[in-house]
Every structure is written in C-alpha cells, then in structure tokens.
Amino acid sequence: MKIIVVGGTGIIGKAVVEELRKEHEVIAVGHNDGDYQMDIENKADIEKMFEDFKDIDGVISTTGMANAAPLYQMSDEDLDLALNNKLKGQVNLVRVALNHVKEGGFITLTTGAASHTPFPGGSAISMACAGVEGFVKAVELEKEKNIRVNVIRPTMVKESVELYNLDIPYTVSAYDTARVYKAVSEMDESGVMYNMHECLEIINK
Ligand SMILES: NC(=O)c1ccc[n+]([C@@H]2O[C@H](COP(=O)([O-])OP(=O)(O)OC[C@H]3O[C@@H](n4cnc5c(N)ncnc54)[C@H](OP(=O)(O)O)[C@@H]3O)[C@@H](O)[C@H]2O)c1
C-alpha cells in the first residue's frame, strides 16, 4: 500500500512510519521535517499534498497539537491551537482525503483518552478530541466511498513520558503504539474509536 503519515516525524509518527515501512511505501509528512512538509492548519496545503502524491491507499494522522493549560490561564492562542490544529486540521484532512484516497482505503486519526476522561488543565484538549471523534462518527452516515475512517486513542507513550519527565505509571512504548496503528489500518471496521489497551490485548493474543 501507499500510505501518508501526517505527523510522521513525531514520537508516535516516527515509530508508525518505521513499522509500516516493513511492508508498505510510506511518505512521512511533518511540519518542518520529514519526506514532505505541510501545515495541517492550512487546507490548501492538504489539497496540495494530495496533488503531489497520487494513488494513496491510506492516510494516518499522528499530529494534532494542543497545549495543556489550566482553565483560567488558558490563552486565546492555546484555544486556537487546539481548534485549528488538532480539531480543524484533522477534520480537513478527512474532508480532503475522502476525495483522493482509493476505494477500499483508510483514514486513521489520533485523539486521546481526554475525549471522554477529562483531566485538570486539559479542557482545550478534551474539546478538540471529542470534536474529532464526533465528526468521525457522523462521517459514517454520509461518506460516499468505501474508505474506512477511524480514530486511535493512544495511551501515554513511554518515550514521551521520559522526554518530558512526567510521573505517569502506565505507559505504552512507541513501538507497541505503532503496532496498533498498523493493525487498525488492516481492520475492516469504520467509524470506530480504538482504545490502545484494548487493541494491544487483541494483537498480543
Ligand atoms: N505521545 C503521547 O504520549 C501521546 C498520548 C496520547 C495522545 N497523543 C497524541 O498523539 C499525537 C502525536 O503525539 P506525539 O507525541 O507523537 O507528537 P510530537 O512528537 O509532538 O509530533 C508531532 C508531529 O506533528 C507534526 N506537526 C506539528 N504541527 C503540524 C502542522 N501544523 N502541520 C503538519 N504537521 C504538524 C510534527 O512535525 P515536525 O516534526 O516537522 O514539527 C510532528 O511530526 C498528538 O495528537 C498527541 O496529542 C500522544
């Protein structure tokens, strides 16, 4: 398959690209780095990416930036980042990709547990994750092509927790996280929100 990974230069994305490259042709897309650069906040950039790369079987987003910020200290810039990058960026990726991805292909987005389990300082993140998930569920009712559109909710990644020196007991390695992205790209379902630990149980059986 020919697969685009937007966010393919990040902690999760790099591992996803490495895992998928064992079997597929993969284009690692970043904002400043990678095989190709674009800005997911700019719909014209997304459209240009699909003009530059044809015959795409699958698109994975492992981007979607949003800052953690306590409610009363949240800046307008924090809110704009969650809205324009994590929410609108991923929504626009689906809107454009549905016109370009091949019949039978897939689109996989990334949210997180914050979509349904809020945490202090995470209101902008929860808003954007829940928005992405609501959009993906609704897409199922109207999409005109046989393209699977799903969401993965990663658990905190071990490498991120080490990088940012966080005190989080339960983590999943970037490698195992990437194995789940690969497995989801091969599953038949569409409109599903995949929780990391449930997927790991399935693929480790
Ligand atoms: N890591 C975790 O523990 C964890 C846990 C739960 C959920 N998540 C979610 O998983 C996703 C990926 O996390 P991560 O830790 O791998 O992130 P990361 O290491 O910060 O990587 C972010 C990726 O997104 C790209 N990017 C940033 N802004 C962009 C833009 N405007 N247009 C296009 N690409 C852009 C970056 O490109 P450049 O490198 O070129 O700047 C990079 O490839 C995020 O949505 C995050 O919220 C992560």
Image (cartoon, helix red, strand yellow):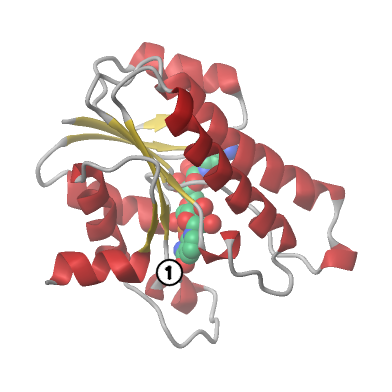
Would residue 31 be visible to someone looking at this image? no
**Residue at the outermost front position:** 141
Residue 24 placement (x, y as % from top left): 14, 37
Rate crowding at label 1 as few (under 14), some (14 to 19) or many (20 or more) other CA atoms within 10 Å: some
174 versus 77 height, above or below: below
172 versus 77 height, above or below: below
Amino acid found under the numbered disc labelled 1: Thr
**Residue at the outermost right position:** 72
Residue 169 placement (x, y as % from top left): 45, 88
Q: Tell me which residue sits at (24%, 16%) in the image.
A: 55
Residue 73 placement (x, y as % from top left): 87, 65
Q: Tell me which residue sits at (33%, 19%) in the image.
A: 145
Q: Decide which of 180, 68 is in the foreground and name it.
A: 180
* Quadrant that contains the N terminus: top left
Side (left or right) of 4 relative to 91: left
* Quadrant that contains the C terminus: bottom left
Q: Secondary structure at mark 1?
A: loop
Residue 177 placement (x, y as % from top left): 31, 63
Which residue is tagged 1? 155
Q: Decide which of 195, 157 is in the foreground and name it.
A: 195
12 versus 146 height, above or below: below
Q: Tell me which residue sits at (38%, 48%) in the image.
A: 192
Q: Tell me which residue sits at (36%, 14%) in the image.
A: 52
Classify mark 1 as within 8 Å of ligand 1 or not, answering yes or no. yes
Q: Which picture quadrant has residue 203?
A: bottom left
Would residue 52 be visible to someone looking at this image? yes
Side (left or right) of 191 relative to 116: left
